[in-house]
């Protein structure tokens, strides 16, 4: 019996649960409820049932409730389920599955996209009550707001700088910087620091979909600085940026926003509550 168990242990491969509320009745006669991203060891396979080990107990599960991480299709299946959960608004499930995906398949062609949606899921979770216990969550004590620190986005920039998700990751990181430093009163230096980030962003990612977003953010910050300092150079810079959007992205929602900004600037309207 000991020899059989030893062989089972050496032959075991990891599996990950992909649905919630899976009942597992183990050889220790105890019932367990398994949920998305719980892991088990697969020790034997048949067409429809897998013999698995959960904790120290053996039992059987329907093969359709899990992904065999040693199977050739596992990389693709795990990514599909992680992205699918995100698209369905199941951010906790998505974050757990995508985290396992990155840990297991970090060299995958889907790695940059998986990291981006892991970051997106964590941002959504950070906005929920009680998110303090989650990894990579910080708190802005001045605003009482929890926020995701952006670890997944930084990995994209470090490991996949040529990916189309690099510009998206950098865009989110600058927004996270803003969240961490709000509110802005008496923080002109911080606003100027963020503005420099947006200018660098626009130079580096001029050929991406996020370029116009960077122009809009830079224009917005110039308006804020103009209101705080009354320096007409900031108003001129904002006008130049919004005009650039009108010329470069005509007949888009970005152009419409730019027109609103320009009209408000001309009317002397304020956009920020201090």
Image: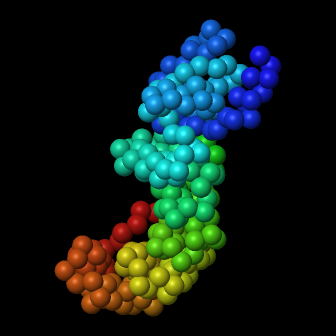
Above or below, 176 against 255 in this view is above
- What is the quadrant of residue 212 in the picture? bottom left
- For this orientation, the residue located farthest to the left is 251
Q: Is residue 199 visible?
A: no
Q: Is residue 8 visible?
A: yes
Residue 142, given in percent of the width and then of the height, sits at 59, 52
Residue 124, given in percent of the width and then of the height, sits at 46, 48
- For this orientation, the residue located farthest to the top is 29
Q: Residue at x 62, y 8 (%)?
A: 29
Above or below, 162 against 103 in this view is below
Judging from the image, the colouring scheme is rainbow
Residue 22, given in percent of the width and then of the height, sits at 48, 24
* Count of residue discs: 0
- What is the quadrant of residue 236 in the picture? bottom left
Query: In the image, 236: left or right of 32?
Result: left
Query: In the image, 242: left or right of 106?
Result: left
Query: In the image, 270: left or right of 28?
Result: left
Between 223 and 180, the one lying in front of the other is 180
Between 172 and 109, the one lying in front of the other is 109
Residue 19, given in percent of the width and then of the height, sits at 45, 33
Q: Residue at x 39, y 47 (%)?
A: 84
- What is the quadrant of residue 45 in the picture? top right
The quadrant of the picture occupied by the N terminus is top right
Between 56 and 230, the one lying in front of the other is 56
Q: Residue at x 61, y 42 (%)?
A: 134
Above or below, 16 against 23 in this view is below
């Amino acid at each position: 019996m000991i020899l059989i168990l030893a062989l089972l242990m050496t032959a075991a491969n990891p599996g990950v649960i992909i649905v919630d509320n899976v009942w597992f009745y183990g050889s220790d006669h105890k019932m367990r409820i398994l949920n998305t991203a719980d892991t088990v060891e697969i020790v034997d396979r048949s067409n429809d049932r897998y013999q698995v080990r959960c904790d120290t107990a053996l039992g059987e599960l329907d093969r359709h409730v899990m992904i065999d991480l040693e199977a050739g299709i596992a990389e693709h299946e795990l990514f599909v389920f992680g992205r699918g959960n995100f698209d369905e608004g199941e951010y906790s499930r998505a974050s757990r599955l995508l985290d396992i995906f990155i840990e297991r398949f970090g060299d995958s062609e889907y790695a940059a996209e998986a990291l981006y949606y892991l970051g997106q899921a964590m941002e959504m979770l950070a906005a929920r009550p009680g998110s303090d216990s989650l990894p990579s969550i910080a708190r802005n004590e001045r605003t009482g707001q929890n926020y995701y620190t952006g670890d997944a986005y930084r990995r994209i920039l470090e490991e996949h700088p040529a990916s189309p998700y690099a510009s998206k990751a950098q865009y989110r990181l600058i927004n996270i910087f803003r969240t961490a430093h709000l509110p802005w009163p008496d923080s002109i230096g911080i606003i100027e620091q963020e503005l420099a980030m947006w200018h660098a962003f626009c130079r580096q990612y001029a050929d991406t979909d996020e370029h116009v977003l960077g122009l809009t953010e830079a224009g917005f910050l110039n308006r804020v600085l103009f209101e705080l300092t009354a320096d007409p150079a900031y108003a001129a810079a904002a006008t130049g940026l919004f005009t650039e959007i009108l010329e470069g992205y005509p007949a888009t929602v970005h152009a419409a926003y730019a027109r609103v900004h320009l009209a408000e600037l001309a009317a002397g309207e304020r956009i920020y509550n201090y």
